[in-house]
Amino acid sequence: MKKEKMKKNGEKTPDQELFISRELSWIDFNSRVLDEALTPANPLLERLKFIAIFSSNLDEFFMVRIAGLRQLVKMDQDRPDPAGNRPSEQLAAARRKLERLLKRQSRALCNEILPALESCGVRLRKPAELSATVRAELAGYFRLQVLPVLTPLAVDQAHPFPILNSGAIEIAVSMRPADRGKLVYAFVEVPEGLPRFVEVPDNQPGRTFVLLEELIMDNLGSLFTGCELEEFFPFRITRDMDFSVEDEGAEDLLQSIEKKLLQRRHREPIRLEVPVNTRGALAEWLADQFRLDDQFRYASRAPLHLKQFFELVGRARLPELLEPAWPAIMPAPFVEHKSVFEAISARGTILVAPPFHSFTPILRLLQEAADDPDVLAIKQTLYRVSGNSPVVRSLQRAAENGKQVTVVVELKARFDEGNNIAWARLLEESGAHVVYGVAGLKVHSKALLVVRREEGAIRRYVHLSTGNYNDKTAALYTDLGIMSSDPDLCFDVANLFNVLTGYSSPPTEWRKIAASPFDLRRRVMWMIEREISNSTPDRPGRIIAKMNSLSDEKMIRLLHKAADAGVEIDLIVRGICCYKPRPGQENLRIISIVDRYLEHSRLFYFFNNGDEEYYLSSADWMFRNLDRRVELLFPVEDEKIRAELMTLLRFQLADTDKQRRLLGSGIYTRPTVPAYTGARSQANSYRYIKELAERDRRSATGEALKVFTAPEQPQHRPFADDREETRDAGEEER
């Protein structure tokens, strides 16, 4: 009651001083993504990509997070989060924030990006804006290529309201058939199997496109012959995809997930998107059918389903409007040695950092293991893999070649459930042992273990990473991993697989790793407490923690304690960050970097009174990662690799091109850069890793090569004034 009273009086509770609401923090992250679409320093088509990424992110946010909040409200579980905000309050705040962001998105696309593209010769047109001749040619294309794919769905007593696909563009139509005067309704789904952007057959310089839904609406009469069309417009619904499964047994789990996947089409709508100024009887009828109040209805003057504008990036054929390519670099050991096993044996531990490094060494490790007669067993975790995965193909071949292949496939990986079920069955058919995750937990760790016979003895090799075994996302996400033959590390990973696949209990103490839900949380919190204990005014503790998300309440409270104790802390958090800096915590800095690649690595540094420690991990500092998933934290002990990791961290801390800093107000600063400088961390990281590889290759000849290094201390160029940022936010609030 006291807390409620304080809120009503406008006073802040202690928790509100410490925390930011998770869902609102995620919206702030997607706002930073949208900022990239508004950044003139980015090439034009890269800005269009960020428009598409923003839209894709928002779809998933509605399907999962907004859906979850809505369910809590409906179930009368309206309890406040650590920041003191109830689900109903978060829904209302999310609506306000999203409305502002969607207006920014529309302005960026319609007022800046599309006009700029038109000046470069790439145009979007409506059919009515084209000449009669061109329009007739498009109608011919419609009859031959589009009409055969379309299926109109009537709504009347004989045809119940159809189950419309979540995320698809639909066209709602009202009309009067010639044989009856009563108004009837129908839907036409815009097929995703056809190009969204239909090129116009004209002789103008450049290229002209018509959106597929516009072409369909221009030819609706072909679908509804003998009817008088009244109204029609495109729309899109997003359904609630936030479901859980009871996983008491392996087969039951598989069947339960398959059943849930079939039910997804029937889940209730959570968002309705329509073009701006969509009014009239048809719009009212549609809103009534979905039973969505105004809070979940969104109107935009931009086209629907902007994720599909990725297609236009390719169709534009203007490479000069894209970022210059950064060809992936092959780590030197895999150039020097024909065999991956030889390379690892020679170096002991090798850093692999895609997408700056090529993903090929991981694929080569699996390919060699599949065909090598000395390899006896392969064990691997799979969370997300690509659609035509070379990883899975190598595992299949290994099993077919008689290797002992064990794969832990996480069937509960959200939105990859169906893909993972298919791969699991293919692997089983090949003779692999497949474990469908662990009851009650998600297996999110990234681990690969190869057991090999060498000179009459057994030797193990391991790959551990912060990212998935997905060759597609490895070209888009920044990750860090190591290949090693370290006996203790391999011993730990072998024990972890015994825990995952059998009835083994986790060891009371691992030799090197930590694993959740067993001891990872305890280990990390102990290391933070150690920095607090060791910290003095003359020799403060030091923590650098890079992750994707920070939302765990206990970890945040402990970090506040460390900051108050004088520990120097840098948090590099790409996405959700629920830590709210307090006045007087000048020794704590929180930054976020959004650039061409998605920052995905988890890297942790602890000063430890001069005996420095470096760790990589699959886990963010979130409750689910620390207590509800199987995750790994593993040390990096090679001095050369540790120095390289610190250099990469310094690049990020010194980045004033792409870095945003979280203020005590909960607002992120925005760097003002008309053109990029030498401070861009991803560009510097790529250059550094490239020069390291070149130096390694030249070292054998004795040829000197200077390697690009990071500044010893972060060099900060002034950001936009904090007061200006606050003022802008205030204007948006109003």
Image (cartoon, helix red, strand yellow):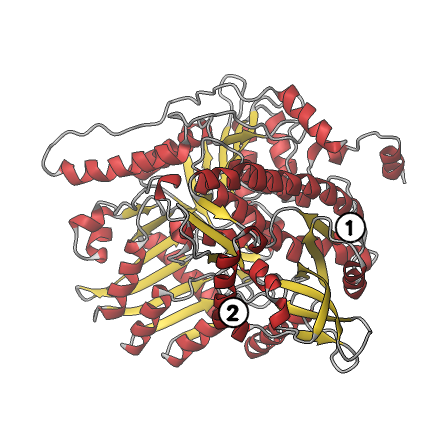
Horizontal relation, residue 10 to residue 71: left or right: right
Q: Say if 184 sits above or below 101 in the image.
A: below
Horizontal relation, residue 331 to residue 387: left or right: left
Question: In the rendered image, which residue does mark 2 sit on?
Answer: 146
Question: What amino acid is at disc 2?
Answer: Val
Quadrant occupied by the C terminus: top right
Q: Say if 532 sits above or below 274 in the image.
A: above
Say whether residue 458 is visible.
yes
Work out whether residue 154 or residue 33 is closer to the camera in this orientation and state it: 154
Horizontal relation, residue 664 to residue 474: left or right: right
Instruction: Answer with the quarter of the image where residue 556 lies.
Output: top right
Residue 454 in percent (x, y) is at 20, 63
* Mark 2 residue crowding within 10 angstroms, few (<14) / some (14–19) / many (20+): some
Q: Say if 236 sits above or below 569 in the image.
A: below
Residue sitting at x 53%, y 50%: 125
The label shown at residue 295 is 1
Disc 2 to disc 1, how far (Cα)?
A: 35 Å
**Lower sequence index among marks 2 and 1:** 2
Say whether residue 577 is visible.
no
Work out whether residue 279 or residue 44 is closer to the camera in this orientation and state it: 279
Residue 709 in percent (x, y) is at 31, 27
Residue 253 in percent (x, y) is at 58, 74
